[in-house]
Amino acid sequence: MSEKIVGILGGGQLGRMLAASASLLNIKIAVLDIGESAPAKQVASLAGSKLKHIDGSFKDPIKIKELAAAVDVLTVEIEHVDVDALEEVQKSTQIEIHPSPSTIRVIQDKFRQKEHLREKGCSISEYLRVDSTVESVKEAAAKLGLPLMLKSRTLAYDGRGNYVLKDIENANEAIDALGGRELYAEKWVTFVKEIAVMVVRARDGTVTSYPTVETIHKDNICHLVFAPLRSRDPSLSERARAVAERAVATLDGAGVFGVEMFLMKDGAIYINEIAPRPHNSGHYTIEACETSQYENHLRSILSLPLGSTDLKVPSTVMLNLIGASSSMSEIKSIVDVALTIPGASTHLYGKSECRKGRKMGHITVVAPSDAELSARLRPLLEALPGSTK
Ligand code: ATP
Ligand code: MG
Ligand code: MG
């Protein structure tokens, strides 16, 4: 067992699920995020301990150092953290940081991440550096074609930071919409499916992975995740795992990584992006795998033996509960339905405010067959706002 205290930068839903998992192994967790009631802090009780959660930003070097001084191992539930501060902690203390600050630095800049993957020979589609000028965007569009996917290099999540440029005359609008931030351009990928693999990187650098899943996005936000992947190509799942494992093997530090990929019609697989932490496409592992991504993240950063990543159910789906408005009422009606469905587990994140497009929770459904899974999922989809049932 481990007596080590884990500090988490970020206290959102991923931190909350990490903390819930930590509590089963009685691992103490200290969380750095703004507010006393961040989702992770609500479930990581420090009652009876001298340790305290920290109220502050994971971008604030002083607060990061304050957290580091109180814990044995640092990890992140979000990549948009101050890496300079983590590097200073790494140089000046014995504290372990997983994944390594250098990995977080590469990943938090999506252009740099692409460059890294290209240098390591990982399979990615075409992209180009662009300046935030109309000429530069036009040049990229001339080379990569339209539509062109313009992406903010940093601080992107849930598609906020992406702009699909369909008409070159809108180049200026695109730059404005992305807030004048540093950009790069990606060729539009005509994928047949989006797939993802959670990879666990042990302290010694060895990698193992969870089953390949299919992810379905709506408005750039993950909507549904199905596992295992159903495909007429029996080699696909293993090929995707190999692509993901190979990519994560090129990064330093322990922990789980989410590898998002595009599947092409001809069977080719391109990596879209990698998250250096537990990931939305791995929520299903809590109910559907022998060891959840959260527990394996903790096990790997604490040098404990890793748990099996195998599925323990024949079929599973995860449905994200995305805010439809500032009211929780739409979410509550879906949860009311979920409570009546066998094999459905509801997770609400305890966020103080509901907003349109905000991830407020998720539901995982497990079933003894794909047919039964569809039957169990249907009433949930019908309860979604805007369903035409
Ligand atoms: P996340 O919340 O996963 O971190 P993000 O803001 O980093 O999201 P991306 O993963 O880059 O955004 O893109 C969001 C979605 O947009 C993808 O899952 C995919 O559906 C679509 N997408 C991204 N890049 C491309 C592309 N080059 N061509 C076509 N579609 C794309
Ligand atoms: Mg991203
Ligand atoms: Mg993504």
Image (tube, rainbow, N blue to C red):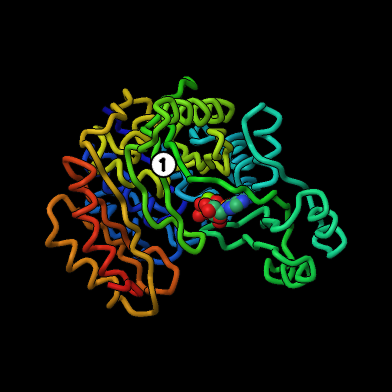
**Residue visible at 65% across and 41% down in the picture:** 113
- For the image, the number of numbered tags is 1
Q: Quadrant of residue 103?
A: top right
Position in image of residue 261 (x %, y %):
52, 41
Could you tell whether 232 is left or right of 243 in the image?
Answer: left
**Above-or-below relation of 197 to 206:** below
Mark 1 neighbour density, 10 Å: few (under 14) some (14–19) many (20 or more): some
Q: Nearer the viewer, residue 353 or 272?
A: 272
Q: Amino acid at mark 1?
A: Val
**Residue visible at 69% across and 33% down in the picture:** 118
Position in image of residue 338 (x %, y %):
19, 61
**Above-or-below relation of 224 to 240:** below
Could you tell whether 380 is left or right of 171 in the image?
Answer: left
Q: Quadrant of the C terminus?
A: bottom left
Position in image of residue 267 (x %, y %):
53, 33
Q: Which residue is mark 1?
A: 71
Res. 246 in view? yes
Q: Quadrant of the N terminus?
A: top left
Res. 64 in view? no
Q: Quadrant of residue 203?
A: top left
